[in-house]
Image (cartoon, rainbow, N blue to C red):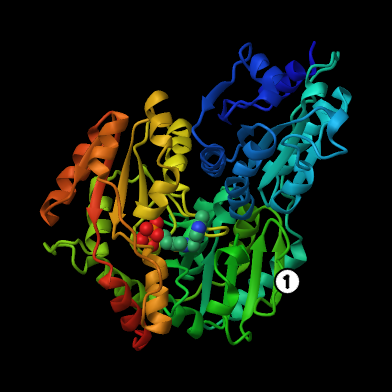
Amino acid sequence: MKAAELFVRCLENEGVEYIFGIPGEENLDVMDALLDSSITFITTRHEQGAAFMADVYGRLTGKAGVCLATLGPGATNLVTGVADANMDHGPVVAIAGQASTHRLHKESHQVLDLELMFQPITKYSSRILTPNVISEVVRKAFKVAQAEKTGASFIEFPENIAEMEIEDHPLPVKHAHSPEPASERVDYAAELISNAKNPIILAGNGVIRGKAWQQLADFAERTRIPVANTFMAKGVIPFKHPMALGSAGLQANDYISCGFNKADVILCIGYDLVEYHPYLWHPSKDRTIIHIDMTPAEVDAYYPVACGVIGDIKHSLLRIMKIASPHTGNSMRELRGALIDDMNQHKENDEVPIKPQKIIWDLRTAMELEDIAISDVGAHKMWMSRMFRCELPNTCIISNGFASMGIAVPGAIGAKLAFPDRKVVAVTGDAGFLMNSQEIETALRYKTPFVILIWNDSAYGLIEWKQMSQFNRPSNIKFNNPDFVMYAESFGAKGYRVERSADLLPILKKALADNTVSIIDCPVDYSENLKLTSKLGEMVCPI
Ligand SMILES: Cc1ncc(C[n+]2csc(CCOP(=O)(O)OP(=O)(O)O)c2C)c(N)n1
């Protein structure tokens, strides 16, 4: 068979359902071989969109999302989405065509050293130089992407290799498992927890990747230790759980900071430093940190680990909770109360532009608990991360490792393909929306209905928030928007404009019931941003 056919068989063997991408001249053989496979190719309108689709598909399913581009400019367009997947630990395998190996050694049309270019943004980057290595390269790319910490792999496939003949077969797929934690580490962690006065848990996205959310909730209930989660771990403990404190991750002081200040022992479970820098929650460097994860901790002066429990998180939690003495109460309960007061603030407000708190209240009311929100990056992300209540894991996707704008709209397509029976909402700023809004056409073509909720402030809101906090004057953050309703309609999608605050909830419900892509243009009152900053700045700790 042709090498390209073997390559596609290897992808099928890995269980690949979808490839997101744009065909080019240097991957003609692969595109042709795909026609005879079980894989559905999702033709996108920008390679960045394809990479974000694969990124969110990977984060939601734990299986590598796959994206494909041609050489040179196609491959450079993949970069942002692949880097996002790698830093947010979304398993992704990115594939690019390449010129024939006969012209890789010199200046040549569209030729860039892609293997090298992808090295800093992947865990594994490889060029296929002979058909004999295809089954190994593909197996390794998937194995590495799907092993902890999950992330991105890249394969460069030159066109002359793709058309060679080869007789070979895919390698059997085996999944790596995290080992059992060492008994002596389990005992030591239990001893530190038993002797703690005010322990607190910081749970990260690794709990979701390790499928350990049930064990985390049981652990918190049995040991009676309160749990804060990072933005990327929303839903890892149900918000209604009595020990749940809510999401931690604002760069500024937040109620949860009082919890970290008060704590003597901090249990970081499935926590990754890229999600929430330790200098923000551990400036004193003097608390006892227990690191429970599948991989050893990153080195950081603000993250001095007293005890690392490395292995399957589910098993570590089950074993520690069996022997640690439970604590007596929840001295940090007031922190949750203060956050709930903030969530309830303005839920009945009828002003336009609409308060962020009200937008989130109505969104939570309109969506079912298992529906999926994908947040873009900006001030809206801060509000969503802090205030959107989640009862189930992976129901609010936040990019907070690489934190790239433009993820929400293509991400919603990846989410809808992964979970066709759930409703999906892309929550986005007006700037992030226009970075990848061309994928509305892709969504309509593949019949993936979802709602896009645009927080419209005609500005780079988050940057304005920071500029005003730091320098008290804005610098170059304003822009004009198109008419989003007409823009939606020009694609054949539905468009809604929120003119009155009372209309938001009915519009959201209607849009969620639409069996198409619906775009809601919602004016937002970002004067609340600075009010939040000053309120938290002046806060007296409730505990
Ligand atoms: C691709 C990319 N470019 C720039 C940034 C820096 N950045 C973070 S938030 C932001 C503004 C986002 O504006 P918008 O999408 O309108 O959302 P808002 O903050 O107004 O809610 C910028 C420029 C980024 N994170 N990603």
Residue pictured at 42% horizontal, 37% vertical: 438
Percent of width and height locating residue 6: 76, 18
Q: Is residue 46 above or below residue 220?
A: above
Q: Is residue 113 above or below residue 87?
A: above
Q: Nearer the viewer, residue 166 or 492?
A: 492
Q: Is mark 1 within 8 Å of ligand 1?
A: no
Q: Is residue 105 visible?
A: yes
Q: Nearer the viewer, residue 111 or 522?
A: 111
Percent of width and height locating residue 424: 36, 40
Quarter of the displayed picture in which ligand 1 can be seen: bottom left
Percent of width and height locating residue 89: 61, 51
Give the mark count. Answer: 1
Quadrant of res 350 = bottom left
Quarter holding the C terminus is bottom left
Quarter holding the N terminus is top right
Residue pictured at 64% horizontal, 80% vertical: 288
Residue pictured at 28% horizontal, 45% vertical: 367
